Amino acid sequence: MSDLTFHLIALAIYFAAMIGIGVYAFRQTKDHEDYMLGGRNLSPGTAALSAGASDMSGWLMLGLPGAIFVSGLVEAWIGIGLLIGAYLNWRFVAPRLRAYTQVANNSITVPSYFENRLHDTSRSLRLVSGVVVLVFFTFYISSGMVAGGVFFESAFDGDYLTGMLLVAGVTLAYTLFGGFLGATFTDVVQGLMMLLALIAIPVVAIFSLGGLDGVSEAIVASGVDHAGLIPEDWNWVAVVGIVSALGWGLGYCGQPHIIVRFMALRDPHSAIAGRRIGMGWMLLSMIGAIVSGIVGVAYVQQNGIDISDPETIVLVMAQVLFHPLVSGLILAAVLAAIMSTISSQLIVCSSALVEDLFMVVAKRKPQPKTLVLAGRGAVLAVAAIACVLAISPSDSILALVGFAWAGFGAAFGPIILLSLFWKKLTNWGALAGMVAGAATVFIWASLGTELYEIIPGFIANLVISVVVSLATHRAGTEKEAEIEREFTETGALAIVKPDAAAANERG
């Protein structure tokens, strides 16, 4: 059999496994909360791997190794920023958000949490944040489908439109029926596939080059210097570049498809084990991606390989180093990185349509079965719109990935943090800050400056939220006191502030 045949067999095995998991999740989904949040019963390992897989997307296996291959370790600053941001997110946001979303009227979406936590009787906060989620993620999903089509075209020598529709169809199938659990369980498998691929490729490549000495000699022979985190031409432009790269970490606390995994944990204490598992996965995966890029330089040099697209360095090494069936599974792992993000974002868009828009305007609460059907219909509708946008691929859609990360980080990040750690935040402060953060991202991006737009957007949101909240806050409300009491009883305070919790128990 030809290599392409083995690759297609591996791809068929992967697709069949994803659909099978979706069928299993479908049988576990009983009501609307199950469909949107898995019944708040995720184990720490499942939540951690799912959050990591839905976060990283194809960037981890294509973008980061390719950037390292071209420019060296200086490109690792984004990874460092993401690692710091992810750790702080798990350490401080996860346990509190899990507790607060439950005591705040059992909120199962980020917009509904904002409304319930801040007692927004106008419902404007929920509507605006729901629209923000829907608009950004529709284009985000479309960019993922474009990436899937392009990947299918380059890796399997197939037609772009066929590949895009195939990726969209399989992802839609297990997400449509399996809901949150379908997306989460497939994320776990996809996350493990990504990790194994990013460990196996550099390890086997190093051995094939004669060990670390062989790698070093080949890199020296290539005539490039990839070893420094600090660029040789150190100047203010380089400083801004590093600050911008680290600024990606600010976005974590505002990404709905990531923090919804915190909301679905069994209890706040599960965040401890989740943090250890999630950060372990992320650290190993990042190291694997970075080493793959560095080793790729040596491998190309020693074997005289011509790389037309640096982002395919992992794919090229996989196809040369492994049996075609194994390399086909590694190619499927790259596809898994893309599909895991699409599925998670589809669920968030569905929740925005049903929970945060439809439920707000509905005259009475629909039956649970009606809500599940509405959720599936919303997934189908968003996927259809994203597919239409992806039929004619555009650089503007692909570029929106980084823009959407900044948009969510600047619009939601400060509000999440203030709602968890500052009692004086008001609904009007949150609404003003959210609009200011999102608007700043749009304006700053249009200016074309070197500084990543999430940084000024995050700061603008934070400042406006605090100023407006101080002007509109009324202390001592009964609802606020009740939520604080119930939050303390969950035990989440003992995770993030053990000394304060102990003093509270003594007092």
Image: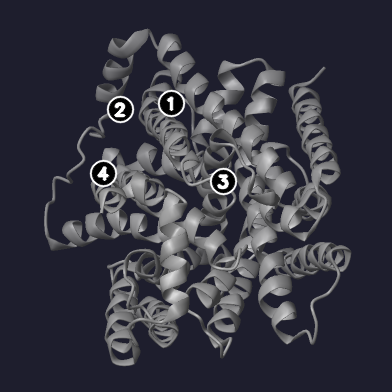
Instruction: Look at discs 2 and 3 and give the one toward the viewer.
Output: 3
| Labels 1 and 3: the sequence-earlier one | 3
What residue did someone put label 4 on? 74
What residue did someone put label 1 on? 300
Q: Tell whether label 4 touches label 1 (CB within 8 Å).
A: no
| Labels 2 and 3: the sequence-earlier one | 2
Is residue 165 visible in the rendered image? The answer is yes
Cα separation, mark 4 vs mark 2, equals 18 Å
What residue did someone put label 3 on? 265
**Dot 4 surroundings within 10 Å: few (below 14), some, or many (20 or more)?**
many
| Labels 4 and 2: the sequence-earlier one | 4
Cα separation, mark 1 vs mark 2, equals 9 Å
In the rendered image, residue 381, in percent from the top left (x then y), is placed at 80, 69
Per the image, label 4 sits on a secondary structure element best described as helix
Cα separation, mark 1 vs mark 3, equals 44 Å
In the rendered image, residue 45, in percent from the top left (x then y), is placed at 55, 33
**Dot 3 surroundings within 10 Å: few (below 14), some, or many (20 or more)?**
many
Cα separation, mark 1 vs mark 4, equals 20 Å
Say which of 120 and 437 sits in front: 120
